[in-house]
Image (tube, grey):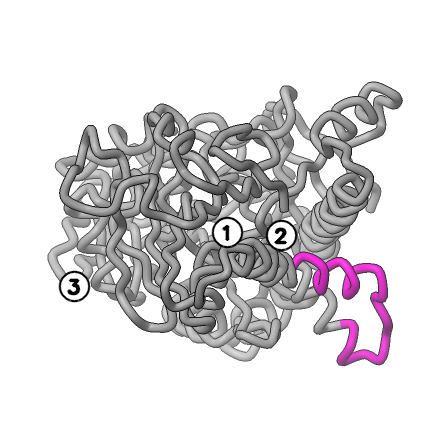
Amino acid sequence: MVSQVLLDAPVKEKAGRIARPWLDEPEFATAANGMRITRGAAPSEPLVAVVGLSHAGLPSALALRSAGFRIVGIDTSSSRLNDIRSGRAEVLGVELEDLRSRLCDEGFELTDRLEAVNTAAMILICVPTTIDAHGRPNLEALRRTCSAVVEHVRSGQTLVLTSTTYVGATRELLTQPLGERGLSVGEDVFVAFSPECLPPGVGAGAITDASERAPTPRIVGAVSETCFRQASELLRPISSGLRRVSSPAAAEMAKLYESTFRAVNIALAFEMADACRAQALDPVEVTEAAATRSSSFMAHYPSAGVGGHGVGVDPHYLVHSLRERGCAAQLAEDALRIVAARPHRVAMRAHELLLRSGRALRELRVLVVGAAYKPGVADCANSPSVEIISRLLADGVQVDFHDPRVPVLFVDGEELQGVDPDPRRDASGFGPEDYELAIVVGLQPGHDYGWLGRCPQVLDCTYRERTGRRHFLL
């Protein structure tokens, strides 16, 4: 099947009946745990179960509700549900206000019971995927969730997997187990893979690539023509368009290719920054100049490392699966090693600057500025700051951190309280002059960092903050 872009075109159905449970069922069962699922006359709004309410699932649930779907949000983590119900969940801008308004909305329900998927017409699986300390994919949560979903699925439902994973996961985790249950995919149930398309920091109603001005179509790989049409009814209202590919496996590979492409370019940006430093050049200036030479050049900038849920995680699912098949992915593996080593590189550079004081490391205090994995969020998932702090603490250095959006950070299982070094706001703690070194990992927009100019030494991992009494680049 030839790939194609489908932009807001109406879905043309083949002759014959397409199952729509929200129209065909006279009533819905009442789910457990306080969910209010309307009984009686068929509702005018289809019910969607969003399974996994993390960085992509919650914004997707909000976007779907805004598009007119009734939502049952499912997450097995009671602490995550408590954060959502209390309005403390990590969502940004309009999403936070949208979440607060939805907490009293009867069309937006929350539960920790996976069996609630049985009440829905369509199911969106958004369980986050992770890696372990050695870069090996951790599929336990996704496997467990998909198994539970398959157990409770009924005829007529549409399942869309969005979790970034290995090529073949949709077949192995959904299509084959559904067949073993006696459900024919494409006739009894409808299955597709569509990788998550909600970059952190982008509003739920504006699902676009944050680095591009043009909207980004959402990739969809379905098991059959009918599966694609059914999945389109769920995805089109929250997408700028749909980019259809021939199969779920093609969509899975497309997501891994995109993330690996970014990892390779970020690794190159790190190497170029080191090369610029060796020749006393500004890597940001050089990068921006290079970007003017060709429209095909994609500017990536150096930093303290890569955090979050994407670039530092997704390519491992490609590399690991290829290793199992005896295939090499040398460029991707080299890029991942460079990216993973960046926080260690920061800690070593800090160590070098601290030794210049001539004092024992245990007598020195360091301030790490920025704990979230990127500006504009409070999410510390895989943040390079955590490894930087861990390595400095292991050296015996006294370390504090400051991030206006992150009050507490967990490092090596220990809780570290954030500090405010600005004496205008907090005169009770350590001030800028009390730190031998400030390491600027990232700055939160809209906050005053003028006090950094009073720090004796600043190691600038953003390459953009010319501040501190003595200023150093990574």
| Quarter of the figure with residue 291 | top right
Q: Which residue is mark 2?
A: 311
Label 3 secondary element: loop
Q: Residue 439's x, y, as percent? A: 48, 47
Q: Are there few (<14), some (14-19), or many (20+) residues within 10 Å of tag 2?
A: many
Q: Is residue 302 above or below residue 321?
A: above
- Are the residues at dot 2 and dot 1 in contact (C-beta closer than 8 Å)? yes
Q: What residue type is disc 1 on?
A: Gly
Magenta-highlighted residues? 322-339
Q: Which circle, 3 or 2, is nearer the viewer? A: 2
Quarter of the image for residue 331 reads bottom right
| Position in image of residue 211 (x %, y %) | 62, 29
Vertical comparison of 344 with 452: above or below? below
What residue does disc 1 label?
A: 308
Number of marks drawn = 3
> Can you tell which of label 1 and label 3 is closer to the viewer?
1
Among the two numbered marks 1 and 3 on one chain, the one whose residue lies closer to the N terminus: 3
Label 3 packing within 10 angstroms: few (<14), some (14-19), many (20+):
some
In the displayed structure, 451 sits above or below 120; it is above
Secondary structure mainly formed by the magenta segment: helix
Residue wearing tag 3: 32
